[in-house]
Image (cartoon, coloured by chain):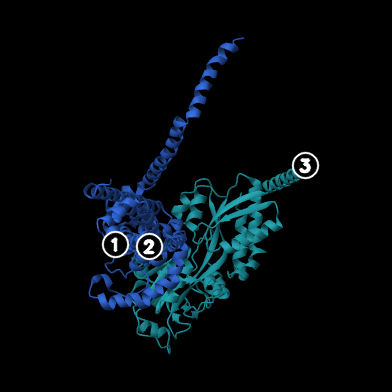
Chain colours: A blue, B cyan
Amino acid sequence: MGTAVVTAPPQSRARNLGKLFRDGDQITHFVTFLFAASVFLVTVFLVYELWIHSGPSRAKFGFGFLTSRTWDPVADQFGALPFIYGTVLTSFLALLISVPLGVGAAIFLAELAPPRFSNICTFLVELLAAVPSVILGLLAIFTLVPIMRQSIEPFLKHTLGYLPLFQGPAYGVGYLTAGIILAIMTFPFIISISREALLVVPREQREAALALGATKWESTWQVVVPYARLGIIGSVFLALARALGETMAVTMVIGNNTGIHTSLLSPGYTIAAIIANDFSEASGDMYLSSLVELGLVLFALTMVLNAAAQLLIIATTGKGSKQP
Amino acid sequence: MKTSLIWNTTLWIAVFTAAGTMAASAETINAAGATFPAPIYQKWFEEFHKAHPDIQINYQAIGSGGGIRQLTEATVDFGASDMPMTNDELSKVSKYKVLHFPTVLGGIVPTYNVPGAASLKFSDATLSGIYLGSIKKWNDAALKKDNPGVNLPNEDITVVHRSDGSGTSFVFTDYLAKVSPEWKSKVGVNTSVNWPVGLGGKGNEGVAGLVKQTPFSIGYVELIYAVQNKMEYGLLKNAAGNFVKADFNTVSDAAAGAAKDMPADFRVSITNAPGKNAYPLSSFTWLLIPDKFTDQTKKKSIVDFLQWMLTTGQADAQALSYAPLPKSIVAQEQKQIALIK
């Protein structure tokens, strides 16, 4: 029959395919492209789902959702402001504590500490990063909260009580406690990544600085750290992302109060915490869709802050010392 | 050696396949809903499965709201809830009507941290006043009047409530709305409300933890939680004017008190129920059963389970710290079973 005619082209096609396989470039290109695209698709799908399911709430409250302070499931009135405020405030407090601490520790571990000690420390830091947040939350309830209530908060009130930031009753739970627990959760990331970034700074950089008469400290602070700046900033933004989205530990120590308070000692709320608290028992379409819209707001907040981060990196890289 | 290994493997595969087919031949019923009665439901479903090996009921404790949602969308065979479905929620169920079957009772107790003051008494007006924020100090005249002879300190009251949406909060706010018109108009009743004052703790353990650690605080937890953790709790004044301590009997009395005026569909709140010893912060928890089944074997299994639950099953309640149903209500429910088609 016509077998000979039919078989010829597949054979040559097979040979082409075989060649492709041998080269591997195109296949690798295609497969990795699929993987990368899946990240993009998941993100798009996520936004799409949040957008669709928050429809009723967006239609009813509009942009007022972002500025309203009411969260009343009985009256079906919902607003996101106390949660946005709490999320941004606690994350900011967390970074305020964890960035100096984390970067400082990374500099010590990468530049100054004996290698053996540095390795042990890094191992412990990585263990700390792997502690589940619910465990940290429980520890916070039983140890951090009493310390805050009995010692730290009364001390702050006593010494800095004239500032509106440190007024009101000391409950032990609140923005500050949440900020501290978030700092504990985020600083292992900062240490770990910043240390890596500092370790890959070429030896020549240090040697050149020393050869020019710089002290060890000057070479570290003026040469090595600026060189590793990108990695350090990256670690900070990873920490920020974690702080913004952290749910369990924060819910357990923030006090879950839907007010907006200036005092850091007051109980508050974050977006992730209200979603975790209310979602399982939320009945009623408006209630549910408002919770979904909060998810959308959190997503947008993360995007905005990440974009700001990128801009900051671009700005500082442009102005700072050129990388050789 | 090698052949015996192959034989072994083949045998094991055969055994597993047989077990698999056996499991598959059992009728599987899926249910979801309230977390508060989950421990007794798990026990019931397990015991019922032992008595009827061909029926397997899976229960997912996803919360009352989730149970109602899944039942509405007919993704489960039946649901469970700590609060009765509202008319609005019932109207959204299109495929069948939903029947409410009370299963056991629970109570909610006030727990507090006031050094030196044991077994405090709270009247309806003081409890609502505290949660509205109008009673701010422990030595308030109203609290002193409820507790003559107790040395109450001149300290601010720290109010603690549940932060997560829960049936417990629903019952608690339902009670406050019944006894306080101000609560009803300003706050209302729901699984989660806009609390006028206080801190939120997640779950019973969150509330209990905050109360335990914060001097001069007050919170509320489920009776079972308080019993299991040997917590001190206060007495509440009931509709008859007596201060009553929550236990299985006083909670069951609340149900018995409500039995006389029981609506046909069992959708009833028994907070502040009449009766000399009725504990005012009591509630049923319900199974939500469709009244129509396309699959008749499934229907029979569920009917069998309900019969079993109302008779044999009730005996398990106290061991797990739930209050059993009073006899009068069991009789009323047995009549409702006939409505399942």
Q: Secondary structure at mark 1?
A: helix
Residue B164 seen in this snapshot? no
* Foreground tag (2 vs 1): 1
Q: Secondary structure at mark 3?
A: helix
Quarter location, residue A86: bottom left
* CB atoms of marks 3 and 1 within 8 Å: no
A198 or A7, nearer to the observer: A198
In the rendering, which numbered label is found on residue A217? 1
Decide which of tag 2 and tag 1 comes sooner along the chain. 2
Q: Give the mark toward the camera: 3 or 1.
A: 1
- The location of residue A59, given as percent across then percent down, is 32, 47
Marks 2 and 3: which is nearer the front?
Answer: 3
Residue B333 drawn at (x, y percent): 60, 60
Please name the residue that numbered disc 3 is placed on: B3
Q: CA distance from mark 2 to mark 1?
A: 30 Å
- From the top left corner, tell me how far across and down residue B143 is, in percent: 39, 82
- Output the chain of dot 3: B
